[in-house]
Image (spheres, rainbow, N blue to C red):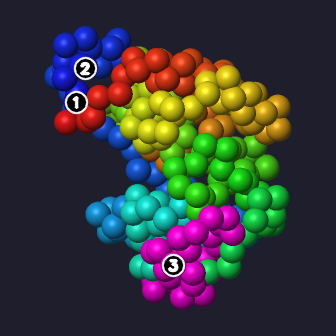
Amino acid sequence: MTDAMREDPPDWFDGDRLVHVCNNAYFIDGEQTLLYDTVSPGARNQLMDALEELLNGNSLDYVVPSHPEAPHAGNANALLQRYPDATLLSSAYGRGEELYYLDQGRQVEAGETLDLGGYTVEFLDATFPDTAFHIWLKEHTSNTLFTADWMGSPHLEGECLLFSDELDSPLSAKQIMEFQARALRWLQYCDPELVHRSIDDLIQTHNPDIVCPAHGTVIREDAVAYMEEMKRVVDMITTGERLAELK
């Protein structure tokens, strides 16, 4: 909670409830299985238990960390030890492939696709990366865009594992800004017009029905409208409306 939030609380904030931020991993269960991101090592037991239940005795075929940071790749090696037949896939772009054992896998480039049987994933160059060594994902059957740190947002205690349309208050640009101004700190120095055009290109190219961020609730309704709302988020960040550190 920031001092600014205490002094000028936004509409979505409730001082009697803790503010939470998600750390998500996404499991795609086709004829073959894929896990996108691996969450933080601090959540390793929860991840492994949930994955065992989801796999229901089947194998894990692919592990895809979006980029080499602990909340995204911190359990990559543990997963490979637990599932030695799984294939690690990581970005062919940038440097840092030796971090979190990502050099043990196969590098994939933007535009490559993978048929999981019932689901088809496409690897995408990250439009809004947190690190240079970074990759996004699109699943074509469900028309879902996986955006790692982009479009993340905090939520309130008691709202964990809810979809964005199930939150007590509608997800707002100010709520998204609270996370984005810190996760992608370079946005405060960007040319907002260029970012707006990049968002337009994303919408035109992918037009997703669902957006799955690594650190926010899943947006399953009005996904494109929320992508448009990110322009307002960027405008607020570049004018310095909210840049305080979390305390």
Q: Are marks 1 and 2 in contact (CB under 8 Å)?
A: yes
Q: Amino acid at mark 1?
A: Met
Q: In the image, 58: left or right of 201?
A: left
Which x, y percent locates residue 72? 47, 60
The residue drawn where x is 19% and y is 13% is: 7
Q: Residues within 10 Å of mark 1 (few under 14, many from 20)?
A: some
Q: Amino acid at mark 3?
A: Glu
Where's the N terminus, which quadrant? top left
Residue 222 in view here: no
Cα gap from disc 1 to disc 2, whole angstroms: 7 Å
Residue tagged 2: 5
Helix, strand or loop for disc 3: loop
Using the image, tell me which numbered label, if any, was put on residue 98.
3
Magenta-span inclusion, residue 92: yes
Q: Are marks 2 and 3 in contact (CB under 8 Å)?
A: no
Depicted 121 relative to depicted 240: above or below: below
The residue drawn where x is 42% and y is 71% is: 75
